[in-house]
Amino acid sequence: MNVCVAAALRRGVVDAAQAEQEQLSAANLHPAFTLAGLGELAQAALTCDRVVQF
């Protein structure tokens, strides 16, 4: 499942790559989720018949 990268960072949620980039000691995003930007959302909207947003 994709998570908005901007919303996640505002709330202090980071994956391993983001934690390394921000020089944080650990990541706290569950492995089942991935950080995604507007590009991924636009691509998903073009290739899918449904987009669930909450």
Image: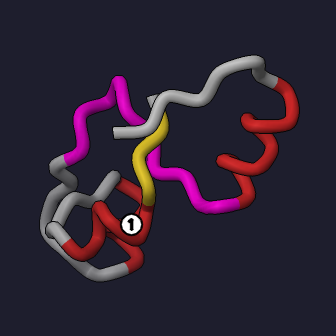
Residue extending farthest to the top is 49
Give me the residue at 86% from left, 36% from top.
46
- Say whether residue 14 is left or right of residue 11: right
As for residue 49 lying within the magenta part, the answer is: no
Residue 29's spot in the image, x, y percent?
Answer: 24, 44
* Residue 17 picture quarter: bottom left
Q: Range of the magenta residues? A: 29-38
Q: Amino acid at mark 1?
A: Gln
Q: Residues within 10 Å of mark 1 (few under 14, many from 20)?
A: some
- Say whether residue 41 is left or right of residue 4: right
Residue 36's spot in the image, x, y percent?
Answer: 54, 52
- Depth check: give the residue in front, 45 or 18: 45
Give me the residue at 44% from left, 38% from top.
53
| Residue 25 sits above or below residue 53 on the image | below
- Say whether residue 20 is left or right of residue 48: left
Q: Quadrant of the C terminus?
A: top left
Q: Main secondary structure of the magenta part?
A: loop
Secondary structure of the residue carrying tag 1 is: helix
Residue matched to label 1: 18
| Residue 7 sits above or below residue 33 on the image | below
Residue extending farthest to the right is 46
- Depth check: give the residue in front, 25 or 15: 15
Residue 43's spot in the image, x, y percent?
Answer: 80, 43
- Depth check: give the residue in front, 20 or 10: 10
Q: Quadrant of the N terminus?
A: top left
Residue 39's spot in the image, x, y percent?
Answer: 73, 58
